[in-house]
Image: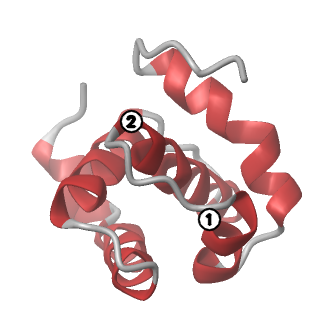
Amino acid sequence: MYRASDRVANETWIDRIETACDRLDLGDSVATTAADLFLSNVPESDRSKRTIAAASLYAAALIRGDERSQSAVADAMDVTRLSVHNHWKSVMDEAGFRPPTW
C-alpha cells in the first residue's frame, strides 16, 4: 500500500505511465493498475523509477488482459526491453500476483 503523498511525490512518473498507455492504446484500468503497482514499489533512485514504471505498465497490461510486447512497452517508456524483462515478474510478485509461466 502507499500513501497519498507518494502519489503527489511521483506525479511525473504517473504522468509518464498515462502517456505511455495512450501511445499503446491501453485503457484507463491498465493505467490505474500500473500506477498502483508502481506506487507500491517506488524505488529511491530516479533511474530505477523509470524501469519500475515500465515494468509496472507491462505487468498491469498482463493483469488486465490487454497485453503488449515488452519491446512496445519499453519503447513507450523510453527504457530497454531488457529492463522490462528483468523486473516485471518481481513487480507482480510484490503485489501478490502470480506471474504467468508460459
For badge 1, the amino acid type reads Arg
N-terminal label among 2 and 1: 1
**Crowd tier of the residue under label 2, counting other residues whose Cα lies within 10 Å: few below 14, some 14–19, many 20 or above:** some
* Rendered position, 8 above or below 59: below
Q: Secondary structure at mark 1?
A: helix
Location of mark 2 (residue) = 63
Q: Residue at (66%, 61%) from the top-left corner? A: 69
Q: Residue at (60%, 76%) from the top-left corner? A: 77
Q: Which mark is residue 9?
A: none
Which x, y percent locates residue 3? 17, 37
For badge 2, the amino acid type reads Ile
Which x, y percent locates residue 89? 65, 28
Q: Split into 4 quadrants, where in the image is the N terminus?
A: top left
User: How many numbered marks have been drawn onto this rendered protein structure?
Assistant: 2
Asked if the residue under mark 1 is in contact with the one under mark 2, i.e. CB atoms within 8 Å, the reply is no
Q: CA distance from mark 2 to mark 1?
A: 20 Å
Between residue 58 and residue 16, name the one nearer to us.
58
Which x, y percent locates residue 21? 37, 74
Between residue 71 and residue 11, name the one nearer to us.
71
Location of mark 1 (residue) = 50
* Rendered position, 52 above or below 98: below
Q: Split into 4 quadrants, where in the image is the C terminus?
A: top right
Toward which corner of the image does residue 15 lie, by quadrant?
bottom left
Q: Residue at (29%, 55%) from the top-left corner? A: 30
Q: Residue furthest right?
A: 82
